[in-house]
Every structure is written in structure tokens, then in C-alpha cells.
Image (cartoon, rainbow, N blue to C red):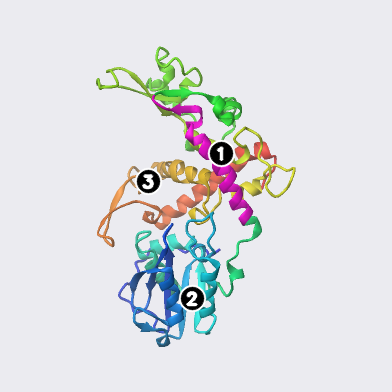
Amino acid sequence: MQKTLFCDEEIDRTSTENKTKRLLVMDAGERLSNVKVYDSHTQSEHWLSLEEYIKIFRDRTFAGVSFDEHEKIYNCSELAHFLLQKDYSLSQVFHKSQMEEILSYINMSDKFEMIAWSEKMTPAALNLARLPKDVGDCKAIANWISLNNQYDKMKKIKSIEDLEMPEVISIGNDWRAKITNADMNKAQKINYGLIKKHKFIQNYDLCPVMRDIILPQWESMIEKLSEPLLKLWNINGWIDAYKKKKTLANHPEWHKHITQNRNLIRISIRSETTENWNKGDIVIKDWIPEIRGIYSAFNGVFDYHGNLREHPMNEGDIVSNNWLHDHYYRESPHHHKGGVGRAIHYHFVFPNYVANCWEEIHGKNTWPRYSQNYYCEFAEKNRRNNRGSLTSEQNKFLQDQRKMIRKLIRDDVWSKYTQRNL
């Protein structure tokens, strides 16, 4: 893995590019059959079909400039985009025959190098160049490599063997895609036993993990969970809601078909009469705690029926903390389809938590929340905040918080059932 290097100094975009070294930085769009290529010599960006991309190396020229004018040509991209196309990733676009053809042209001359960087390097480059994600990422990477002289410090790719996944990674990807994702999707579909239809229906029999494990242990879970997890999952949020009469438990005359855990269900009171509601009606909104985050943690160790998950490689064993760390909440996000559980936790539950933690220290509205837009001068339009909107200090804060949360889930939830520690 490349280490992430952050720097808050602005890039001098008027500086001249290295005349002896030329970078062709490729980015592959999800589910697309074309690629984006940034040329450091002409400082231009091009969208190419896969055949046009391969043709670059066959013809030894690009953007009207021959490769003969440079001592070294670097064909580079995130490693995930060079890996051979598999079902478990949206970002891998090349079949084996296509990559073999590219490598055959690359290996014909010592002038060419095919190099790859870790996806962890992309936020560093975007922060350094002050460019937005998915718009200026290729240019940012080119600047980062040039300014930090990283040409010969990336992973070098010489053969197909350099792009093949280790067997354990492939097994983990299949396990996540076919088993844990499926279980998480089923639980989501029925809203973890509080089913949303024309009116809410409560049926925990359809969600055994909620019926047999999470809800029966609710009180003891509160006592044993660390404070950050209580906050992350809003475990005690019902207390404040109850005081404000915003839980179903405050209104026993309403929705009597909901018989369990009424204190954990948020309601609203209609302020006016409409076609479907009268003023003063009590309307069920959803769960008060972040049930989806809680369930995603338990989904790692329990299958949909509430049984401890079997280890996919060690017959007779249950999943271990090591396995869950490497293959359930996988550190690689969409490039390896990190999984539904990971996506729910890190894209829907965790962002508000880390923003609140930051603002408790630095004050309100000091964190670029994903729900907010900013004006992007580079794109000349409003864009939604994302990871690239963070400063280097904020990105470090996010990484530290995420690392802590992952450890607490292992220590407070997984270890309780696997009885194995990292």
C-alpha cells in the first residue's frame, strides 16, 4: 500500500511539466466501456474507448505528440482499474486478452513503465491540488507524482500475474457478494422487522437476528457498548424523544397493532388535515436508533436465521475477527465492492457521526456535510460535498475515527460471539 501524503500548499499550476518524463493517467468509470486519460505533456484530458486506449501504446503516440520526444512514458492508474474484470468490482474494465495486449506493447521497450497506485493516494492528491473528486482526479494524481517524484516508487506491472487476486481475496469477495450482502439486503427490505407498507407492520419473525439476538439483548448491549458506539448508533436517542413525546410509547391509544419496542419508534404529529391524515394524527416515521448500523455489525457474525456464520475457508469453524476485519468491513470500498454492510455503515451512518464529533470541537457548520453543496470553480457549478471536500486535518480526523469505530465493533460486538481477538 502506498502511504497517503497530505500537504496544504497550493500547487503552482503554471510550473512547467517534466520534459523527460510523460504521464498518462487513466481513470475507469463505473459500468462504463470507456476510460478517461490525462496527458501530463499536453495537460489535456480525453475520453477514449477501450480500443482507442490500447491503440495509444500500439501507435506510440497520443494527443498528436510522439512518445519519441520523451525519455520515459508512464502508463498509470489506480491498481483497481488495472485488475482483470471480475463480477465483484464495478471499476475493473479490462478482460485478460485486452490487458495482455497492453502489456505486450509496454514491454517492447525500456522507455515504457506501467505503474499503479493505491486508492488511498487519491484523496492526498486531490487535497494537494485543490481539485474535486471525479472531475480533477487524473490531473491531481499527475501533479502529485511529479511534485513528489514518485515515478519509480509505485507498484510496477510487468505481467498478468501482477494483476491477479490472491485466492483468499477472491474467496472473501465471493463470500461477501453472495452471502453477507444477500442477508443484509433481505433485512433492509423488511426494515429490520418494522415493515413499511401502506402502514407500518411489526413482524420480527421475518427478521430472526432482530427477534432473537439484538432486541432481547438491548439493555445489556447498552451497558456493554463503548460510548462512541452508543453515539454512532443513537442507542439512547429514544430518551430525549420520549421526553418530547416523539415516540410511539407516548401515545398508547395509537397504532395498537405495534406491540413491542414502542419506545424505539419515532412518530410525528400531523399539523394539518390532508387527504390521508387529520390534524393531530400520530404518524409512524421509523426507528429512532440507527438499526441499520447495528444490524450491519451483527450481520458480520450471524447469518439471516441467527446462526453464527461458518468460516468459508475453515470447515467447522465460525468466522474469526481476523476474517471479518479483512473481508466484511473491507478497507477497499467500491473498487472491490466493499459490501452492503460496509456501505450502510460508512456512507449512511458514519458520516453524520464524524461530522457531529468534529463540530463538537470546532463549532457548528465547520464540517462539509455530504448533504450540502459547494460551488466548484473548476467545474463552474455546484457540487455535492464528498471526501475530496475535506481538509487534510479533517481527513486525518475521519480516518482516526473510522479506525476507532472498527476496533470498537470488533471488541464490543464481534469478540463477544467469536471469542477471538485480533
* Quadrant location, the N terminus: bottom right
**Mark pair 3, 2: CA separation:** 38 Å
Which is in the foreground here, disc 1 or disc 2? Answer: 1
| Residue type at numbered disc 3 | His
Q: Earlier in the sequence, mark 1 or mark 2?
A: 2
To which residue does mark 1 refer?
A: 183
Q: Where is residue 178? Give x, y as percent.
A: 58, 46
Question: What is the secondary structure assignment of the residue under circle 3?
Answer: helix
Which is in the foreground here, disc 3 or disc 1? Answer: 1
Which is in the foreground here, disc 3 or disc 2? Answer: 2
Answer whether residue 329 is magenta in the image.
Answer: no
Q: Where is residue 92? Give x, y as percent.
A: 49, 61
Q: Residues within 10 Å of mark 1 (few under 14, many from 20)?
A: many
To which residue does mark 2 refer?
A: 151
To which residue does mark 3 refer?
A: 362
Q: Residue at x 58, y 41 (%)?
A: 409
Q: Where is residue 208? Give x, y as percent.
A: 59, 29
Q: Residue at x 29, y 20 (%)?
A: 277
Q: Residue at x 45, y 86 (%)?
A: 71
**Mark pair 3, 1: CA separation:** 39 Å
Q: Name the quadrant containing residue 266.
A: top left
Question: What is the secondary structure assignment of the residue under circle 2?
Answer: loop
Q: Earlier in the sequence, mark 3 or mark 1?
A: 1
Q: Residues within 10 Å of mark 2 (few under 14, many from 20)?
A: many
